[in-house]
Structures are given as structure tokens and as C-alpha cells.
Amino acid sequence: STKSKVAVVGSGNWGSVASKLIASNTLKLPSFHDEVRMWVFEETLPSGEKLSEVINRTNENVKYLPGIKLGKNVVADPDLEHAVRDATMLVFVTPHQFMEGICKRLVGKIRKDAEAISLIKGMEVKKEGPCMISTLISEILGVNCCVLMGANIANEIAVEKFSEATVGYRGNRDIAEKWVQLFNTSYFVVSPVQDVEGVELCGTLKNVVALAAGFVDGLDMGNNTKAAIMRIGLREMKAFSKLLFSSVKDSTFFESCGVADLITTCLGGRNRKCADAFARNGGKRSFDELEAEMLQGQKLQGVSTAKEVYEVLSYRGWLELFPLFTTVHEICIGRLPPSAIVEYSEHTPKFS
Ligand code: NAD
Ligand code: 13P
């Protein structure tokens, strides 16, 4: 048939919510098959049962999104190749550090006419330079890849509170419209923007600023300081994005993926939360330890992104242009104390 078939690669906190959103729409839209295949990185729960089996029995991801029904048409599948085999629309939503390995496993296993979208906030740094996750997907799998980013704390969308999101696309607007159709609901309003790099860099870089905001919270520095850090961070986000890709549009920073995601993540995200605890402990407990203790299997993206951004900056000789990004990484690795976030961010360079 000519109906589109959707597979979701990833089933963490946001992956589970994305599957729920998509599954509510595939039931309503005649151009999509009802069933949504969701690949589960298999694990054994303390009860001894397999996570994928529990999801299929209870219709809930009891580990990463407890208490929320995903919809009966979501089918958990622990076999990656099987999950994607017939899909014409592939949704990638895992923590970014796992994507390169997953893409390599999928070479030759997906349909040649498949379209992809990435909901993943992060980048890879190669010898040749930075590589966005959507580019990794496009290049390894030979598919077109859009992105969806926004002010989207998963637990809030899971209970259907209103939010917005941005689809970034290049070239073909019809494909962007199809992704909008698949994700858009009355409480999740999605707008397309022709700027993949800008949308994806917003989603990626705001996680570094969220760590800075968390340090400020952990030091009890108050609202003005936090707002200053967010402003300086937003300016570095824009400058960095435009230095990497001259095509990035100013207007993208005013979409949900830009300033709105920065705000929500600095107020209520996991990166903020763990950075707050890191600063309260005076940097004596590592992020790995705090992540394992505070997030129960969910993953931080900001700490590795700060390192990746730092590598790009130092390789290109841009460290002094980005005091906030640079300082966040140096705090994360213990080279500077958390209080340095304010001292160093004050040395702001002049961006034209
Ligand atoms: P998560 O933080 O809940 O991560 C846990 C997931 O990682 C689980 O599905 C687990 O099985 C999987 N995992 C663990 N080890 C693995 C391995 N070796 N290989 C493959 N998978 C493994 O994940 P998430 O919240 O769905 O985040 C995915 C992406 O979405 C991230 O880039 C994140 O920044 C982004 N995002 C998250 C939210 C949110 O509120 N959670 C919102 C917007 C965007
Ligand atoms: P955290 O990963 O910091 O929770 O941010 C979630 C997010 O990306 C909200 O849009």
C-alpha cells in the first residue's frame, strides 16, 4: 500500500512521549498505518522481566515514562533491524552518544525511500570537524533527515500540557509538512522552518547553557544572575551557530527551538537539575555519579556537548570568543570551581 509506516528508534523519556504523540495521530490520519514500531534498547527490570515485554503487556514504559499509556498501536520491539525494516518514516530519538553505533548497524537495513527525522540534541566531533546528528544519519544511511526541536520537557507533554515545537528542513517543504502532520496535536503545535542547522544547533547548544544556569542555581545567585547567564548563553549560541554555518537564520532563535527551549531547559530540565547538585557539592561529586543517582537511567546531554563544543573551539582558536561555553566545560572537568561561571562569563567578547 502507499500508506506511510513509522518506526521510532529510541524509547527513553522523550522517545516514549514522541511515540505516544505519533501513535495518536497515525490512528486518525488515513495516510499512515496505525501501528508505530518503537525500538527498545533491551534491559532486564528488577522484577526479572524484559522491558520490551512489560511495555507490550502494560502499554507503559514503566522505567522511562511510568504512569502514561502510550496507545495500543505502539509496539515495542527489541530487534533494531526488525523494527525499522518496513518503515518509510524513521524517527530517531536516543541519547546522542549512541547514534553513530546505531546508524552503522542500520546500513543496508532500511528502505531506500525512507525519510528520517532526528529529535536528538547533540553533535559528534570528528577529525574533519563537528558533525550534527542529522548529518550523521544522512551520511551513514543515505537518507534525507529533518529535525524536530523545541521547548519540550517530555514529562509535561506526556500529560498533554500545551507546548510548541519547530521542524527544521532543507529543500523539500512537502516532507516537512508530512512530519508536521505526524507530530502536530492540539497541545503540541509544530511549525516548519527552512534551517536544519539552526534548529539543531539551538537544541544542542542550549544544553550547555542549562548547565551554566544550574551552577548559578546551585550557588543561590538569584534570578538576575541566571537571566544574565541565559542572555550571554543565547548570544554564544547564535554566534557559534553562525560561525559554523553562515546559512543559519536569526529568526530561528525566536522559534520554539531557540529562546523557548533555552528558557524551559534552564528552568526545569535534567541538565539544570544535575548542575545545581554539582555546584551544591562544590564540584566534589562527578556528573557521572550524579546522573546515575538522580536520573535513574536517563541521560544528560549537556556535559558531553560542552566537551564537544570545547574541542571545536580549541581546534579553531575560538576559545576566547566563547567564555561561557569554555567555562562550563572547564567546570565540568574540575579545572575551575562552579563559581567561575560568573567570573569568566563577565569577560564577554564583542560579537558583531
Ligand atoms: P533518556 O535520557 O531517557 O535516555 C535513556 C534511553 O537511553 C533509554 O531508552 C535507554 O534504553 C537508552 N540507552 C541506554 N544505553 C543505551 C545504549 N548503549 N544504546 C542505545 N540506547 C541506550 O532519553 P530521551 O529523554 O528519550 O532523550 C533522547 C534525546 O531526546 C536526547 O538527545 C535528548 O536531549 C532529547 N530530548 C529529551 C527531552 C526530555 O525531556 N527527556 C526533551 C527533548 C529532547
Ligand atoms: P534536559 O535534557 O536538560 O532535561 O532538557 C530537555 C529538553 O531538551 C527540553 O526541550
Image (cartoon, helix red, strand yellow):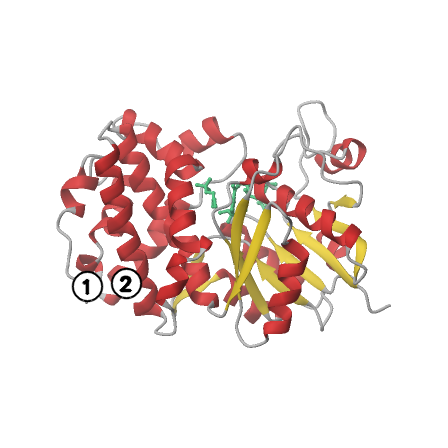
Residue pictured at 59% horizontal, 76% vertical: 172
Residue pictured at 41% horizontal, 30% vertical: 289
Q: How many marks?
A: 2
- Of the numbered discs in the image, which one, if any, rests on residue 180? none
- Of the numbered discs in the image, which one, if any, rests on residue 239? 2
Q: Label 2: how many residues lie within 10 Å, few (<14), some (14-19) or many (20+)?
A: some
Residue linked to disc 1: 351
**In the figure, is residue 115 to the left or right of 322?**
right
Please state the horizontal and vertical placement of residue 281, each as a whole percent of the image: 29, 25
Residue 309 shows up from this direction: yes
* Residue 308 occupies quadrant: bottom left
Q: Does residue 89 lie above or below 152 as drawn?
A: below
Residue lying furthest front:
186
Q: Are the residues at dot 2 and dot 1 in contact (C-beta closer than 8 Å)?
A: yes
Tag 1, which secondary structure? loop
* Residue 235 occupies quadrant: bottom left
Please state the horizontal and vertical placement of residue 68, each as a whole percent of the image: 67, 32
Residue pictured at 34% horizontal, 47% vertical: 208
Q: Label 1: how many residues lie within 10 Å, few (<14), some (14-19) or many (20+)?
A: few
Q: Amino acid at mark 2?
A: Ala
Please state the horizontal and vertical placement of residue 43, each as a whole percent of the image: 66, 36
Q: Viewer-proximal residue, 344 or 101?
A: 344
Estimate the spatial distance between the alpha carbons at disc 2 and disc 1, rounded to whole Å.
7 Å
Q: Amino acid at mark 1?
A: Phe
Q: Quadrant of the N terminus?
A: bottom right
Please state the horizontal and vertical placement of residue 266, each as a whole percent of the image: 37, 40
Q: Viewer-proximal residue, 250 or 112?
A: 250
Residue lying furthest bottom:
171
**In the figure, is residue 282 to the left or right of 119?**
left
Tag 2, which secondary structure? helix
Is label 2 within 8 A of ligand 2 (CB to nearest ligand atom)?
no
Q: Viewer-proximal residue, 263 or 104?
A: 263
